[in-house]
Amino acid sequence: MNVNDLMVHEPKCCQPGATLDEVARLMWENDCGAIPVVSEDNRPLGIITDRDIALCAMHRHQPLWELRTGDLIHDQRLCCCQQSDSIESCLAKMEQNAVRRILVTREDGTLAGIISMGDILAFTASGKTRGAERISADSTLGMLKNVSGHHGDSSAQRPAVH
């Protein structure tokens, strides 16, 4: 089983000039907690989560319609995987980068989709199956614990909010 089998294909996206108000509306209308930010030629530049929006608004003391996604992703380290990557290698990359969602690219570097921990958890050994293939519950839950667990004082690890 590879990433292409489980990812959300063609997710809703925005460009760096979009306001956080517009991105929050996309999240609401599409029942999702993250929106990829892409260039005009559909190359991933970053990702905005609902948590990013809330924290940016709080730190900046500005309304969402005055804040741009480009400001929020300015220092973001981009984390992507390929459609053909195995779920196991995707999980490893998510764990290494401490992310719960990862952007998926095509061979040409354009955005193909997004895969989240929820997508992967839905197909763990105790969950749904596609054919006879299942994802190891141990590796999935281990990764989730490492990414989602409390890490003490993680203020040095938090991305900067501009």
Image: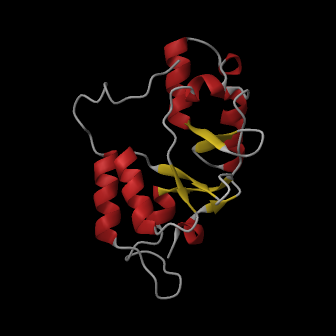
Comparing 94 with 124, the one in front is 94
Q: Residue at x 24, y 28 (%)?
A: 153
Q: Residue at x 43, y 28 (%)?
A: 159
Furthest residue toward left: 152
Q: Position of residue 129 (x, y in %)?
A: 49, 80
Q: Position of residue 101 (x, y in %)?
A: 50, 50
Q: Is residue 141 left or right of residue 88?
A: left
Q: Is residue 54 left or right of residue 37?
A: left
Furthest residue toward bottom: 132
Comparing 122 with 78, the one in front is 78
Q: Residue at x 68, y 34 (%)?
A: 23
Can you tell which quarter of the image residue 40 is in? top right
Q: Is residue 61 left or right of residue 66?
A: left
Question: 26 above or below 133?
Answer: above
Furthest residue toward front: 108
Q: Position of residue 115 (x, y in %)?
A: 54, 57
Comparing 92 with 115, the one in front is 92
Question: 91 above or below 101?
Answer: below
